[in-house]
Image (cartoon, rainbow, N blue to C red):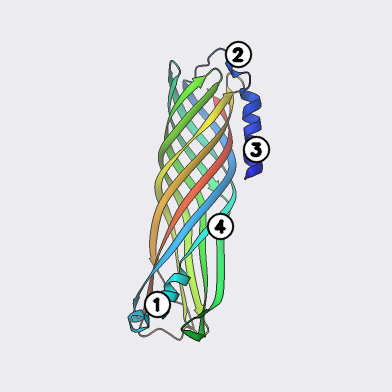
Amino acid sequence: MKQILTLSALAIGLCASPAMAQDEEDWTGPYIGVQGGYTGAKSDTSVVLGGAWASESQALRDFFGNSMGTKQSDGDVNFGAQLGYNVQTSGIVLGLEGEFSVLNGGETIARGPLAVPSIPALSYSYTNTVDPKHMFALKAKLGGAMGRTLFYVNGGWAWTKATLGTSVTSNGNYLKTGSLDTTMDGFIVGGGVEHRLSDNLSLRLTYDYTDQGDETYVTTYRAGSSFTTPAYTETVTQDLRLHLVRVGVNYRF
């Protein structure tokens, strides 16, 4: 990520250095472009126990629920395309942009076997998965033009297709799993700097943050589990947040 930020800043800086010496450009009109960069994905998982868990000790319930929940953080590249329209009045630029990005990567972490402090002979192993696949966003822009360079902030709504999941295995043959393929949605905010390389071509550097909210799903028994009756239940809540740093090229019509 540091390399992407450094190279992007250098590219924008080299292009923007003569900006003050240029006549002010008109940013009004439609544009289309491509972009790519780094995605930092973060996800927190919490678990609520129900059913036959009420018959177990508080110590076991606390250990199990706290161990099954976790925090995840993963980073990978992204790439996509954008389409938008700007309107400029004096030095103020208003715009609307839609984008689609492919989010590579995904993470499954495994922990255990973890022994229960109050029952040392009993241990559990856990896995947690977060896998954002692609995102669509619609954003409004507000910016200021300085010569051939545009500085702006943006905000709107985003939708992300993702796979979430968790599983547990014990040495007592307690086997459970849960997963969800879903489209999450939430706000997106950010900003960027864009520089005109020519009348039609521009280069930009952007940062966006999106909170995609959380989803809830339940676990089910896996084949071969010794514990099926009475039913133990786990309700899992998992969220998704994304940090996106990208370099893009736009063509203006």
Q: Is residue 184 above or below residue 168?
A: above
79 vs 232, left or right, is right
Examine the image and state in which quarter residue 179 appears. Answer: bottom left
Cβ atoms under marks 1 and 2 closer than 8 Å: no
Choose the circle earlier in sequence order: 3 or 2.
Answer: 3
Examine the image and state in which quarter residue 214 appears. Answer: bottom left
Give the labeled residue for mark 1: 61
Examine the rendering and report whether any part of residue 172 can be seen: no
- Residue drawn at the location 56% of the way across and 19% of the way down: 148
Which of the two discs, 4 and 3, sits closer to the camera?
A: 3
Q: CA distance from mark 4 to mark 3?
A: 25 Å
Choose the circle earlier in sequence order: 1 or 4.
Answer: 1
Give the labeled residue for mark 4: 106
Cβ atoms under marks 4 and 3 closer than 8 Å: no
- Residue drawn at the location 40% of the way across and 83% of the way down: 228
Q: Which labelled disc corresponds to residue 21?
A: 2
